[in-house]
Amino acid sequence: MTIYKGGQNICGATIGVLCLESYFPKPPGHIKNPSGLPFPVLYEMIDGVTVPDLLNNPTPELLEPFLKGAKKLEGEGVRAITGSCGFLALFQKELSAAVDIPVFASSLIQVPLAFHMTGATAPVGVLTADAGALTAAHFDAVGAGGIPVAIQGLEDSTEFAEVILKYKRTAMDTNLVEAEVIAAAQKLLSGAPDIRSLVLECTDLPPYASRLQNELGLPVFDLTTLATMAHNVVTREHYFGFMPL
């Protein structure tokens, strides 16, 4: 007989997600759309904290509700924690120190991995929601300080910026957003043709990762693939196969 200690309201979720408050569409591939994820998730809403808050006013006071949310997710039994915005990179050290399970606050934690996987000579391309808000401190916080990067943002777009960055409305034309994302990536490659990998900072970009790869011909790293790896790391299973007799 196996006796489990219990104490969780919901069981079996591998990845816990600290969620900013947003109501625009999240297509499959987004960390906040569980229908497209290959692992079970548990969401913790950080009420009242929006994308503009985190990008434009990341004060120390903003950290407290995320710490509280991380501890709650840990108590509910998740095995690793992430967030719904790549700009949470600023809080990586504090969040990971607050709990006893792995935390990967941002997809930017993959920048060193992408750099070393592709020869450690070319800059890593970073596609972000807002290049002006993405600072050296974000990279430093996830151990990516000193890694050469080429950054392109979507702050000058129309549909993406109005819906996701400015919260002007909740309805969104995903075909138009996709076109804006591809255009931003092409601009990135035009300005930095030597990049050999692409990291998507923003959690709203993974739904377009396949198209991005087809257009650029590069390895594409994002939060959803990172979370999938984390799920596999914390839920190892036996290998099945056979050996020669």
Image (tube, grey):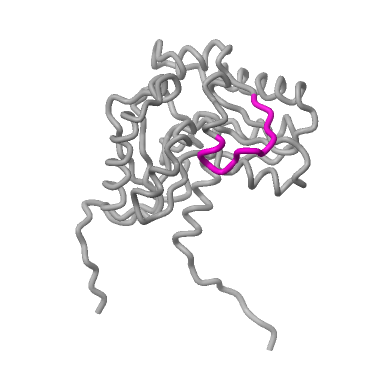
Residue extending furthest toward the bottom: 245
Q: Quadrant where the C terminus lies?
A: bottom right
Choose top left, top right, bottom left or bottom right for residue 8. Answer: bottom left
Q: Quadrant where the N terminus lies?
A: bottom left
- Left or right of 160? Residue 146 is right
- Left or right of 6? Residue 198 is right
The residue under the point 43% across, 48% down is 103
The residue under the point 56% across, 43% down is 143
Decide whether residue 148 is among the magenta residues. yes
Residue 234: give x, y in percent of width and height.
45, 59
> Quick one: 59 or 80, which is closer to the camera?
59
Residue 140 sits above or below residue 128 on the image: below
Decide whether residue 114 is among the magenta residues. no
Instruction: Report the span colored magenta.
Output: 139-151
The residue under the point 60% across, 21% down is 153
> Quick one: 78 or 174, which is closer to the camera?
78
* Numbered label tally: 0
Residue 123: give x, y in percent of width and height.
73, 35
Residue 95: give x, y in percent of width and height.
38, 44
The residue under the point 47% across, 45% down is 104
Residue 210 sits above or below residue 50 on the image: below
Residue 164 sits above or below residue 6 on the image: above
> Quick one: 89 or 196, which is closer to the camera?
89
- Left or right of 145? Residue 20 is left
Residue 145: give x, y in percent of width and height.
60, 38
